[in-house]
Image: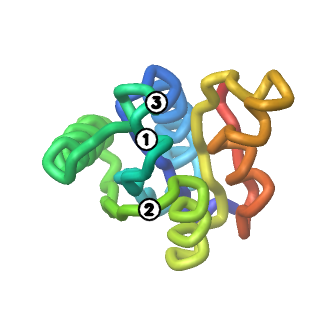
Amino acid sequence: MFNTVLLPVDQSREAREAAEVVLHIVKKYDSRLILLSVIPESDSESESAPPETMMSSERVAELLKNAKALFAQNEIKAETISRQGQPPFVICDVAEEVDADLIVMGCRGLGLTEEGAAESVTNRVINLSPCPVLVVP
């Protein structure tokens, strides 16, 4: 059912909670697991971005290494990808590239307001995704 699962990761608590859900899905369906981290493009808006979204390539490499090790402890082989760009678009592009059957991601709850819904990475991924998206609250 879920041959390839894509898990976008960052340093948030929500991403760690999504990883726990992915662990169960990948084991149950014997899925290929792809871990993705996106380095946001710098622009004028990034100055007001939360600290966890401000990541260098070195921090992303370390984050992916740690995430891969976490899954390895559970006998799950994970592939890693890091890209630069606007997170919602990069997530959807990578999902299409790897022929993902499912994207699993955390949600910070920022989309509960009208302004937040327009800015929410999760909301944008849901609307643009080439495959189903499982949102872990």
Image quadrant occupied by the N terminus: bottom right
Left/right placement of residue 87 relative to residue 51 reads right
Identified at 44% across, 27% down, the residue is: 50
Q: What type is the residue that disc 2 sits on?
A: Gly
Taking depth in this image into account, of 34 and 10 the one nearest to the observer is 10
User: Which corner quadrant holds the C terminus?
Assistant: top right
Q: Are marks 1 and 3 in contact (CB under 8 Å)?
A: yes
* Residue most extreme to the right: 114
Residue 37: x and y, percent? 37, 51
Check disc 3 and give the amino acid type.
Answer: Ser
User: Residue at (72%, 51%) from the top-left corner?
Assistant: 124
Amino acid type at image mark 1: Ser
Q: State how the image is colored.
A: rainbow
Report the residue at 68% width, 53% height from top: 125
Q: Nearer the viewer, mark 2 or mark 1?
A: 1
Looking at the rendered structure, the secondary structure element under dot 1 is helix
How far apart, in angstroms, are the residues tagged by discs 1 and 3?
A: 5 Å
Quick check: marks 2 and 1 in contact, CB under 8 Å?
no
* Residue 46 - label: 1
SS at mark 3 in the image: helix
**Which residue is denoted by mark 3 in the rendering?**
48
